[in-house]
Image: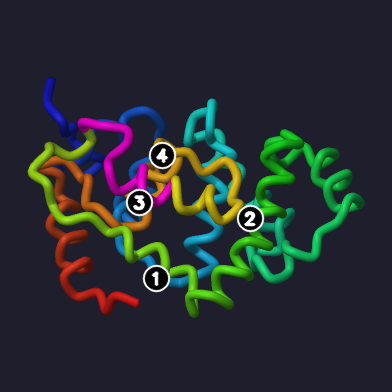
Amino acid sequence: MSAVIPGPDGRPRCRWCAAAPEFFDYHDQEWGFPVVEDIRLFEKLCLESFQSGLSWRTILVKRENFRAAFADFDFRKVALFDEADVARLLADAGIIRHRGKIEAVINNARRACEMVEAEGSLAAFLWRFEPAADGIPPQSRSTSAASEALSKELRKRGWKFVGPTTVYAFMQAMGLVNDHAEGCVMRDEVEKARVALSRP
């Protein structure tokens, strides 16, 4: 089976785009392009934790609701959430109402504040785990040595819902690895952006 499928314009895209119409725009405009902004990195870690056990489409279609519910994922604001906020979020039909995941976001916001204090930024810490290219075909795995190391370090620092599979999906999406399939029209675009990136 080919790793690519024709997109709406007839050019090849990663096969996973066929799973939902929303995926083509997300794939072409976001997935794999390198991100060094702390709030976007925090948001993605949170959304990946919410996705655990669900489809990414479920999260993507609710993303604006999540942003409204969690103060645009400004972790300094989310760190101040209390039990009243947890109750508010559990009553919010626009997001995934899972107490453990909601409480994990609040916990992780507090850990993010600590990390910025200790490391200077989330980006400075997270990009330390960017792996060297290893020759394994893109999208042929759901975890890696780098995601396992990052997951272990985050958990050691008190973060929750950040297992190696969740962390690997985060690394793919935020451009720490380029997992666009060989032949995908976006693979070279993402690689150019990664080459041009000023690492934190």
- The reply to whether the magenta stretch includes residue 56 is no
Residue 178: give x, y in percent of width and height: 21, 52
Residue picked out by circle 3? 171
| Dot 3 alpha-carbon crowd within 10 angstroms: few under 14, some 14 to 19, many 20 or more | many
Question: What is the distance, in whole Å, between disc 4 and disc 2 at their CAs?
Answer: 16 Å
Nearest the eye: 131 or 138:
131
Query: Which one is earlier in the sequence, the residue at label 4 or at label 1?
Result: 1
**What type is the residue that disc 1 sits on?**
Val
Horizontal relation, residue 101 to residue 52: left or right: right
Residue picked out by circle 4? 164
Is the C terminus in the top left, top right, bottom left or bottom right quadrant? bottom left
**What type is the residue that disc 2 sits on?**
Asn
User: From this viewpoint, is residue 25 visible?
Assistant: no
Query: Which one is earlier in the sequence, the residue at label 4 or at label 3?
Result: 4
Picture quadrant where residue 61 is located: top right
Question: What is the distance, in whole Å, between disc 4 and disc 3 at their CAs?
Answer: 10 Å
Please give the name of the residue rendered at 53% of the width and 32% of the height, measured from the top-left corner.
52
Query: Which one is earlier in the sequence, the residue at label 4 or at label 2?
Result: 2
User: From this viewpoint, is residue 105 visible?
Assistant: yes
Residue 43: give x, y in percent of width and height: 55, 57
Residue picked out by circle 2? 108
| Dot 2 alpha-carbon crowd within 10 angstroms: few under 14, some 14 to 19, many 20 or more | many
Nearest the eye: 113 or 184:
113
**What type is the residue that disc 3 sits on?**
Met
Question: What is the distance, in whole Å, between disc 4 and disc 1 at their CAs?
Answer: 20 Å
Please give the name of the residue rendered at 37% of the width and 28% of the height, measured from the top-left corner.
19
Q: Which residues are magenta?
A: 140-151
Nearest the eye: 86 or 24:
86
Query: Which one is earlier in the sequence, the residue at label 2 or at label 3?
Result: 2
Question: Does residue 44 lie above or below 166 as drawn?
Answer: below
Residue 65: give x, y in percent of width and height: 68, 49
